[in-house]
Amino acid sequence: MTGRPADWVAAACADLGTEVVVGWCVGLLAGQAPDDGPSLDHLGGPGAADLVAGYARTPGKPDYWPRVWAARALRYAWLDGPEVHGAVVAALADPAWRVRETAAALTRVHELGEASAGLRLLLSDEVPRVRAAAAEALAVVGEHDDLDALAAVHEPDPGVRRAVDRARRLLAERLDLPDPGARGA
């Protein structure tokens, strides 16, 4: 097995079938126990299962890695449908910022328009990377209300501010509307 997530997921799909892998990822995002399925090495790479098993024995260690890996795997193994879409949209509200960030990126990659409301909420997330991912996703899946939401953002982080400005411009262009954040608009 090579060292890239896309390769791990491709191997998992070849070994287990895409339906099984996608269903497993949906289950993990919904809170399924990580040991209730194939080896997490399929999603997180060699050693992932051992890492999570070690965390399970150590109070206070993070429990989010299986959900992060599941969300990331859905970038490479995807079956369109309401259950999969629903799991990704629900993951936008996950308590772990890494899951929220990855889910936001998934809504962009798979163009999940139904994620707009959740993405708008993430524009005020406490983690800058999540805010940036939400803005980037809205550039692809957003509609008129999302353009207004992006224009109303007053972002203190310069990197996120650039992502929001870029997203606002791209969304305005995609919707063939004037950019409400542009000077003179």
Image (cartoon, grey):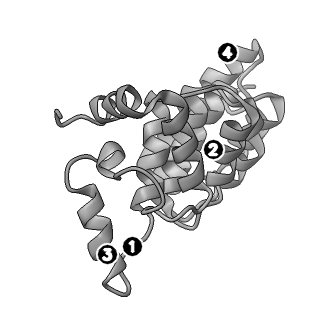
At mark 3, the secondary structure is helix
Q: Is residue 114 above or below residue 100?
A: above
Q: Are marks 4 and 1 in contact (CB under 8 Å)?
A: no
Foreground mark, 4 or 1, reads: 1
Left or right: residue 121 compared with residue 6:
right
Task: Give the labeled residue for mark 3.
Answer: 55
Q: Residue at x 48, y 38 (%)?
A: 21
**Whether residue 164 can be seen here:** no
Task: Give the labeled residue for mark 4.
Answer: 173
Q: Residue at x 59, y 60 (%)?
A: 125
Distance Cα–Cα, label 4 vs label 2: 26 Å
Q: Are marks 1 and 3 in contact (CB under 8 Å)?
A: yes
Q: Amino acid at mark 3?
A: Tyr
Instruction: Return the disc, 1 or 2, that comes first in the chain's sequence.
Output: 1
Task: Give the labeled residue for mark 2.
Answer: 88
Instruction: Return the disc, 2 or 3, that comes first in the chain's sequence.
Output: 3
